[in-house]
Image (tube, grey):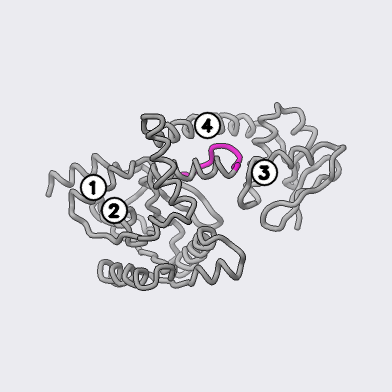
Amino acid sequence: MAALHDISKAMIPLPKWLDPKKPYLLGISGGRDSIALHHWLVENGFQKIIYCHLNHELREDESDDDERFLRQLLGADLMVGRVNVTEMAESKSLSLETAARDARHRFFQNCASQTGINHILLAHHADDQAETLLFNLLRGAAGLKGMKARQGLGALTFLRPFLEIRREAINQYLASFNHSFRDDSSNLEPFATRNRLRNEVIPLLSEIMKRDITKNILRASHHHRELEDAADIYLSSIEILDPQGRIHLPTLRSLPKALQKRSIHQFLLSHQIPNLTSSHVDQALTIANPDASPSMNLPGGQRLRRKEARLFISL
């Protein structure tokens, strides 16, 4: 077993920003990735983990079987929530994927409120990241935007220690220890966009290009993030916002167009505007022109307005 333990640590190293002595929440589905994260944390000496499982009620008996499996595995350390995501999606005119994501975020907020723990571990890995990058690129997102290993959302901080680990390494790790997990049959259903990207599009593109395109997608994202980081360092030295937190348009217009777009994008993100695309950023840049319309609608029901050489958000 010692040899296998050494192998697991070599496959999946412990990030420096994780501390085994601190408490964490872990979002767990019972699937291979979150089960691998659970066992990996235990093997690395983490003892203050509270597990959070949301039953989405999407797969009838299978969803209940997932919950029973986790109760047997984790016992009193498991917090469980239930929500009918199908009904939620229909009532709010959302896709199933969006409704499920929103339900999970609310559930995590409830878990954090009950436990006083705001750091939530998630099992997203490098192949998930590639799917996210491709999905965002195809829907017209502003830049090659993916997930971050450490990502704040309101009072919560999401931590993804597997984000640079490939799916194959996780599968090898599970096989090495013969850990049991639950298979989610909905991951094979073709109606979900991400399922089609994972099961059809990425394999087809890899076949056409005769190479592992996931690796290339991740490399391109890494280069893009380096450029964004450099731009942000430069922009941090410029006072673009006035004391009221509004964009000062004369200062904005003095920048190259690419930095103007980056400034607006970061400004909108700081106001937690959801589902931003490059089209929103381009339109916002147009609003900055004094001859253009002085306002525009933003996702989430807010508006971007121009007044007295300033850009600001209002309801």
Which mark lies nearer to you, 4 or 3?
4
Label 3, label 1: how far apart the Cα atoms are: 41 Å
Q: Earlier in the sequence, mark 1 or mark 2?
A: 2
Q: Earlier in the sequence, mark 4 or mark 1?
A: 1
Q: x, y percentage for residue 127?
A: 39, 43
Which residue in the protein does label 4 denote?
224
Labels 3 and 2: the sequence-earlier one: 2
Mark 2, secondary structure of its residue = helix
Disc 4 residue type (three-letter): His
Q: Is residue 145 magenta?
A: yes
Q: Amino acid at mark 2?
A: Ala
Q: Are marks 4 and 2 in contact (CB under 8 Å)?
A: no
Q: Which residues are magenta?
A: 140-148
Placement of 107 over or under 245, stated as above or below: below
Q: Residue at x 74, y 33 (%)?
A: 252
Q: Nearer the viewer, residue 20 or 41?
A: 41
Q: Main secondary structure of the magenta part?
A: loop
Which of the numbered marks, if any, corresponds to residue 267? 3
Of the pair 285 and 214, the residue shown nearer to us: 214
Q: Which residue is mark 2?
A: 36
Q: Is residue 157 left or right of residue 272?
A: left
Above or below, 235 against 189 in this view is above
Residue 134 horizontal/vertical position (percent): 49, 41
Which residue has dot 1 on it? Answer: 173
Does residue 166 appear left or right of residue 110 in this picture? Answer: left
